[in-house]
Image: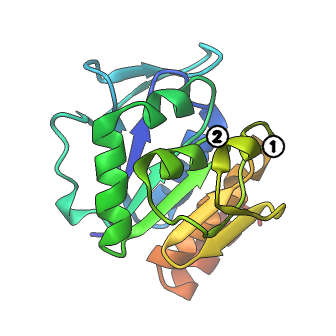
Amino acid sequence: MKRVYILLAEGFECVEAMAPIDVLFRAGVDVVRVAIGESLDVKSSHGLVTLRCDVTLAEADFNDGLALILPGGNPGYINLRNNDVVCRVVREFYKSGRLVAAICGAPTVLAAAAVAHGSRITCHSSVIADMGDYSYVGDSVVEEGNLITAAGAGISIDFALSVAARLVDPETLSRTRQGMEL
């Protein structure tokens, strides 16, 4: 079975995490929810949702992962960005050619991990200045090589579908979209 990992830090944005989890589940992809802290329970940015993860970052074995997903949310993306292990995992995925997908403020994790410099990206307007030498593109979703970035919460389904399109065949993607009335 195809497996992806989604990294969840305290303060993640609900829809930016749940849309990829839901869309990929519908497409038959195994999504492993990884808690960045010591607890498997991770609270969202607005405190509305506490998500139970499958493993903690310390327990996770990323070797079988085809993709790594980084949701935004404040302070979720900051908590991801400031974690050395998260940055190491991002580097490993990116350098090995596996898919790295980041939405909202989470593209700043790419900069912290020192990967994909100069690449075309998009991100939330509040973090454009933090993106240094990346080539900001104002599109909703930007794909370049093994990198997918998206602007923010309102683009979460499109972001999730872009990830799914890289992992499943066109028929599966079509069935997934039809099941969601897209």
Compare marks 2 and 1 and give the one earlier in the sequence.
2
Q: In which quarter of the image is residue 174?
A: bottom right
The x, y position of residue 159, in whole percent, is 65, 59
Name the residue located 68 percent from the left edge and 44 percent from the top edge: 104
Classed neighbour count for the residue bearing mark 2: other residues with Cα under 10 Å, few (<14), some (14–19), many (≥20): many
Identify the amino acid type marked 1: Ser
Residue at the outermost front position: 133
Q: Identify the disc placed on residue 105.
A: 2
Total marks shown come to 2
Asked if residue 116 is positioned above or below residue 108 in the image, the reply reads: below
Circles 2 and 1: CB atoms closer than 8 Å: no
| Residue most extreme to the top | 47
Amino acid type indicated by mark 2: Gly
Question: Does residue 180 appear to the left or right of 85 in the view shown?
Answer: right
Q: Give residue 127's position: percent from left, percent from top.
A: 72, 40
Q: Residue at x 58, y 65 (%)?
A: 148
Name above or below for residue 58 compared with residue 31. Answer: above
* Residue 140 visible at all: yes
Give the quadrant of residue 58. top left
Give the residue at mark 1. 125
Labelled disc at residue 63: none
Identify the image quadrant of the N terminus.
bottom left
Quick one: SS at disc 1?
Answer: helix
- Which quarter of the picture shows residue 96? bottom left
Identify the secondary structure beneath mark 2.
loop
The residue positioned 52% from the left and 50% from the top of the image is 111
- State the residue in front, 28 or 102: 102
Q: How far apart are marks 2 and 1 (CA)?
A: 9 Å
